[in-house]
Amino acid sequence: MMLGGNLKDCNAEAYDLVLNGVEIGGGSIRIHNPEVQEKVFRLLGLTEEQVRTKFGFFVDAFKYGAPPHGGLAFGLDRVVATMEGEESIRDYIAFPKNTSASSPMDQCPSEVDLQQLQDIHISVQMPKTAEKK
């Protein structure tokens, strides 16, 4: 991976498995070298605090000997829904988020800072609250 030069020359080892136009699996080899991770986070303009807040669980995993992440993950829920002709996988999800719609493993959903939204050209407009009569 080239980190000091032209970012368009960087490559990823990533792949998807598609059935009838529906992605049913995919994978990639994730960055598992802490030095490379740090450089990429820096190139992305993330502070150490932002890295800790957003990716702490992932960065910490390598301190405890987690192996490189790579392989193919099938979305069995997507396979079954596709076979059944369903567009939504909601009824087929084996382990949905908990009843408060959050994921305890990665603290999702989490706050998104304004700069992230601006970077991807998303604006948020909150609805005006209805006045009480």
Image (spheres, rainbow, N blue to C red):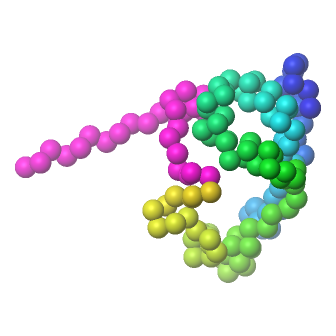
Residue 130 in the magenta stretch? The answer is yes
- The x and y percentages for residue 84 are 67, 80
Residue 48 in the magenta stretch? The answer is no
- Between 61 and 70, the one lying in front of the other is 61
Q: Residue at x 74, y 24 (%)?
A: 42
- Between 27 and 54, the one lying in front of the other is 54
Q: Hey, which quadrant is residue 82 in on the image?
A: bottom right
Left or right of 129? Residue 115 is right
Left or right of 81? Residue 17 is right
Helix, strand or loop: magenta stretch: loop
Q: Hey, which quadrant is residue 75 in on the image?
A: bottom right
Q: Residue at x 62, y 57 (%)?
A: 105
Q: Is residue 8 above or below residue 68?
A: above
Magenta residue span: 106-133
Q: Residue at x 61, y 32 (%)?
A: 50
Q: Is residue 25 above or below residue 70?
A: below
Q: Residue at x 68, y 23 (%)?
A: 45
